[in-house]
Amino acid sequence: MIEYIKGELIELTPTDAVVECSGIGYHFLISLQTYSQLENSRSVMIYVHHYLREDEELFYGFGTKDERELFRLLIGVSGIGAATARMMLSSLTCDEIRNAIMAEDIARIKSIKGIGLKSAQRLILELKDKIVKGAGSENVIIGGGRNNETVEEAVTALVLLGFTKANVNKAVSAVMKENPDATLENIIKLALKKL
């Protein structure tokens, strides 16, 4: 599986991007969120979602892991395809989508082209609990001024050990509030005691 591609931005439109990496040009379908992030860049890093079906193979590109995680959550809903999820990410920001789902704002979700009443209700029904628990987000909530890379490494390690992302985020946040200068090992050890 491809995690990301780093290279030179060759072409960019509001719906597509071409990135050259090691002499190969990769075509990505992108949202307006990603377009605005890449607009004035020459060297870029695109997070990849490889969409593979019997009759088509596409790469969806995202400017952030957070956007890609929400995209994956959206396409997991029955009746929401990749094109509809991309339209949602082009119409609203990731936070606006999450907030609309958590607030059960059917009118806001229905305002997106391609989303009707039943789809909006299904999105809320299937995703509200997942979003409240932290699914579809790569954001780590931390208290205190700490190197984000170290905290992200700790969160990743704990998730790989089998804990849910929501519980890990709570435990790591608590550890960082109590010990803002903790090392990676100490963050993991202290968080394990809280899990």
Image (cartoon, grey):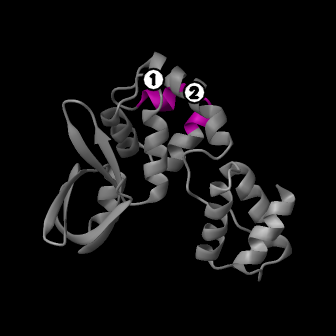
Q: Position of residue 170 (x, y in %)?
A: 76, 56
Q: Which residue is mark 2?
A: 126
> Residue 45: percent from the left, percent from the top?
33, 68
Residue 108 falls inside the magenta stretch: yes
Hey, which quadrant is residue 27 in on the image?
bottom left
Which residue is rendered at x = 29% and y = 57% of the image? 35
| Residue 100, horizontal then vertical, whole percent | 56, 36
Which one is in front, 144 or 110? Answer: 144
- Tell me the element at label 1: loop
**For the residue marked with disc 1, what is the amino acid?**
Ser
Give the mark nearest the N terminus, 1 or 2.
1
Seen in the picture, residue 132 relative to 12 is either above or below; the reply is above
Q: Which residue occupies 49% across, 32% down?
A: 108
Tell which residue pokes out farthest to the top in this image: 118
On the rendered structure, is 91 left or right of 41? right
The crowd level at tag 1 (other Cα within 10 Å; few <14, some 14-19, many 20+) is few
Q: Which mark is residue 109?
A: none
Whether residues under marks 1 and 2 lie with C-beta atoms below 8 angstroms apart, the answer is yes
> Is disc 2 placed on a helix, strand or loop?
helix
Closer to the camera in the image, 61 or 22: 22
Find the magenta span and give its range.
100-111
Is residue 17 rendered to the left or right of residue 103?
left
Please identify the dominant SS of the magenta region.
helix
Is 16 within the magenta? no
Tell me the residue that label 1 is attached to: 78
Quarter of the picture holding the C terminus: bottom right
Q: Residues within 10 Å of mark 2 (few under 14, many from 20)?
A: some
Amino acid identity at mark 2: Glu
Residue 66 place in picture, x, y as percent = 49, 55
